[in-house]
Amino acid sequence: MEVIIFIMFFLLAIITIFLFWKYVHLKLDIYEYTQNLDTVLTRMLKSEELKPEPYKKDDLWSSVYDRLVRLSRLYLHKNMEISEEKDKLKELVSDISHQTKTSIANIKLYLEIMTDESNFKKNQEYMRKMNGQINKLDFLLQSMVKMSRLEIGTIKIQKQNTLLADTLAMAISNVIIKAENKDIKIKVEYDEKLKLIHDKKWTTEAIFNILDNAVKYTNNGGHIRVVVCRQELFTKISIEDNGKGIVPERLGTIFTRFYREPEIHDNEGIGIGLYLARKIITLQNGYIEVQSKVGKGSIFMIYLPNRDSGKITIL
């Protein structure tokens, strides 16, 4: 009996020692875990990149650290995007401020000259120049309104089965004066009876933005060719120019918001034309492709589906 009691006490002592040992180790593990977590979170708050480490042992911390490394990369990537967006916004505000101040200053100057000018023909010329400056201001304001509507998502895509010819005509009519001022010929090839389910208003805007860019980057005396081709699944609208072209490294950025070619940075605009065009076409379940050769021109290809998917899309 005494032997049994001794064995029981002995086993109880071993179990107690084991549980105490486990408690100490668990406490140490928890302390080490919290210390590691605090160190890593502090590094993340300082925007330091966490380096992946090989698993020393298959435990909870190794698993958590691996996820924190991925979270750190995502956090740093988002911070870079926000920083780049802020830089673009600063540049945008600077551009708009410069363009607005220049136009307003010119209008004031023309008004001052006109008050002392009695020659009717000269006053007519000043009026024409003032009208040009007012058009620039109007263009800037309209661009800002469109960008604002993009940001808050109030632009709605409403598709109907209408003649594509009418959409093309509206887009071309909005750019024809600029083209004529540069003696640029616009040639259009299309089927006048072709109907397509699309949003007439916003598709016109998308085509106009691409045409406007084509005129902007094409030298005097150049030409622009618009070709409509109905394919099996999509209707393709090609807009080809013989302008200066786009360097290969910029092809991936021309559709980003606020992007502007460095060569024409002093011209009016805020860099949302192609961004808006791609948004409009994408949200009608279509897409845009671009091909370009420096010094030879560019081809923008708009693909709109021949059949409506039935989805209601809101931009």
Image (cartoon, helix red, strand yellow):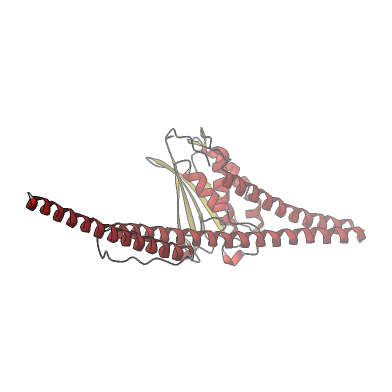
Please name the residue shown 64% across and 58% down the image: 182
Position of 120 with respect to 138 (left or right) is right
Query: 235 or 46: which is nearer to us?
Result: 46
**Residue 171 position (above or below residue 46):** above
Q: Is residue 274 visible?
A: yes
Query: 195 or 281: which is nearer to us?
Result: 281
How many numbered discs sit on the rendered protein? 0
Residue 16 image position (x, y, % from top left): 22, 55
Query: 109 or 167: which is nearer to us?
Result: 109
Q: Residue 11's image quarter?
A: bottom left
Q: Is residue 166 visible?
A: no
Residue 209 image position (x, y, % from top left): 57, 50
Please name the residue shown 83% across and 59% down the image: 108
Position of 189 with respect to 176 (left or right) is left
Please name the residue shown 58% across and 44% down the image: 152
Residue 211 image position (x, y, % from top left): 56, 52
Residue 214 image position (x, y, % from top left): 56, 56
**Residue 221 position (above or below residue 152):** below
Looking at the image, the residue that sits furthest to the front is 2
Please name the residue shown 45% across and 67% down the image: 48
